[in-house]
Amino acid sequence: MPSGSNGQSTGAGALLAILRDGHARTRAELAQLTGLSRSTVSQRLDGLIDHRWVVAGDGAISSGGRPAAVFAFNGSAHVVLAADLGATHARLAVLDLGMTVLAEQAVELPIDEGPERTLEFVAAAFEESLAGLGHDPAAVCGVGVGLPGPVEHASGRPVNPPIMPGWDGFCVPEWLGARLGGGRRTGPPPVLVDNDVNIMALGEHWAARPAVDHLIFIKIGTGIGCGIISGRRLHRGAQGAAGDVGHIRVPASDAPCRCGNSGCLEAIAGGASMAAALRAAGVEARGSRDVVALMRAGDLRATRLVRQAGREVGAVMASIVNFFNPSVIVLGGDIAEAGEQVLAGVRETIYSRSLPLATQHLGIRASELGDRAGVIGAAVMVVEHVLAPEAIDRAVT
Ligand SMILES: [Zn+2]
């Protein structure tokens, strides 16, 4: 990658990164910002314009003489496809590279139908959306998929996902790329896959702009997990298993967990375990959504369980706050949608148990995007991949 005297990239990708802030700039401004010569800037702009990532605009900035041409990020020439697949429902969207949502739909789609049937439905729905928008499949520059189970991000394969029969080891990028890439001169589009909590963290981080450097997204649904944004990047860990806080041991509990251990956070504060506790007390509750519905209807047992869950999650998060020192914690998932009942318990415990320095400027809030966090995050994952400076440099040269 070409680099300037300060060691930072000065290739076409770096120029595009500057223009992505939405301001149109002249060659002279770009030369000043990068330390490159005007002729080098012109040459790199030509490459970016050829690939339709940049458009030349009408010169409006005058420097005493004739107006200079200005250049702007062209977010609308390419689209990304984003899918957030849950256990029973999916949310699908088509966005442009500027993150404008062009089409979005929520559909019933049971993941236990297996990978081929599920992904065929997703692919057909994407094709229909693209046709409706008048976009050629060649305009698709990437596909992002979130799955409700562990995923090895590098290969895009689910690994022993507990609620996804038939998906273990299935190569989602290969299948979906081949299905959507038919007839494309440029070959199949890149397909990126990650677990639902990671893409929700990406979505909330994007929504939290202007920039938050260190954010933790915690999902309290049927199970419990968190996505970690460190230094504005998603931290996946060595195998992609980072953030699996649901199986951290809670002292004082020996409740059996689906992972085979006992005393896990999820086994007392997850939606599935709370529904089971209610059923044991003779209350009809199938899952996390029923727990929240019962609480909203004024059921005292459900309310007590949800408040206690908030405190249990808070106790685990207090250690994580001391360890990681995030500036924002975002709560999402079915149970978190119970709102203040959960937030209050989480806040109370974190503030009383974490170190003052770590909580001084800590924000703890409910998800801004709600059930759209995943699909927005899946698109963020693709846009950041496609527009990464080194990827742009490679494409342009
Ligand atoms: Zn466990």
Image: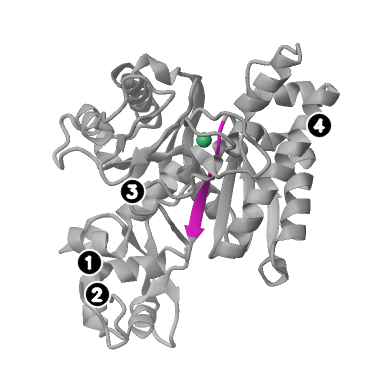
Q: Quadrant of residue 30?
A: bottom left
Instruction: Give SS at disc 3.
Output: loop
**Foreground label between 1 and 4:** 4
Specify the amino acid type for callout 4.
Arg
Q: Quadrant of the N terminus?
A: bottom left
Specify the amino acid type for callout 1.
Asp
Residue 57 on the magenta segment? no
For the residues labelled 1 and 4, the Cα–Cα distance comes to: 63 Å
Residue where numbered disc 1 is placed: 46
What stretch of residues is rendered in magenta? 223-229
Report crowding for label 3: few under 14, some 14 to 19, many 20 or more residues within 10 A (C-alpha).
few
**Residue 304's disc number:** 4
Specify the amino acid type for callout 3.
Gln
**245 or 113: nearer the viewer:** 245
Marks 1 and 2: in contact by CB < 8 Å?
yes
Residue 227 on the magenta segment? yes
At 23% across and 29% down in the image, what residue appears? 175
Residue where numbered disc 3 is placed: 239
For the residues labelled 4 and 3, the Cα–Cα distance comes to: 37 Å
Marks 3 and 1: in contact by CB < 8 Å?
no
**Residue 42's disc number:** 2
Q: Is residue 58 visible?
A: no
